[in-house]
Image: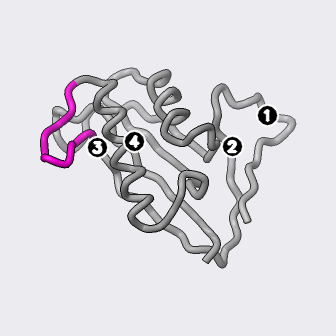
Amino acid sequence: MRREINPSNFPEPQSNYSQGVVHDASAARMVISGQVGVRPDGSIAEGLDAQMQQTWDNFLAVLKTAGFDKADVVKVTLFTTVPALQEFRRGREQALAGHAPAATYVQVAGLADPDFLVEIEGEAVKAS
């Protein structure tokens, strides 16, 4: 069982995410390593929009390979080296089809490769 938490005495989320997510402790839990904008052929997608799309594609591929669905995602964290809050919100909406996990956006000085602009990690939970 999964329940989104948005306290009534808090400001409303500014996009489609939840302040917290409660899930059943007896569920299967998947922790997804940071995914970046690297295509299956090993090349790095060029530009913020292309990397954002490829990063979400990679995130969803890991999720699907393990037998999880978009609706099982309970937390995502996006790291970016350039201002990209609106792009993150748009990408999350498109990739998760309106699903609202807990979410964090962080702008950092750099990622593992200087050509990486975006990295997304997360957690998913589903009934086992």
**Secondary structure state at the residue bearing disc 2:** loop
**Along the horizontal axis of the image, is 72 left or right of 47?**
right
Q: Nearer the viewer, mark 3 or mark 1?
A: 3
Q: Spatial distance from mark 3 to mark 1, Cα to Cα?
A: 32 Å
Q: Main secondary structure of the magenta part?
A: loop
**Residue beneath disc 3:** 36
- Residue type, numbered disc 2: Gln
Q: Nearer the viewer, mark 4 or mark 2?
A: 4
Q: Nearer the viewer, mark 3 or mark 2?
A: 3
What residue span does the magenta drawing correspond to? Answer: 37-46
**Residue beneath disc 4:** 56
Q: Is residue 75 above or below residue 13?
A: below
Q: Earlier in the sequence, mark 3 or mark 2?
A: 2
- Residue type, numbered disc 1: Phe
Location of the C terminus by quadrant is bottom right
Q: Quadrant of residue 114?
A: top left
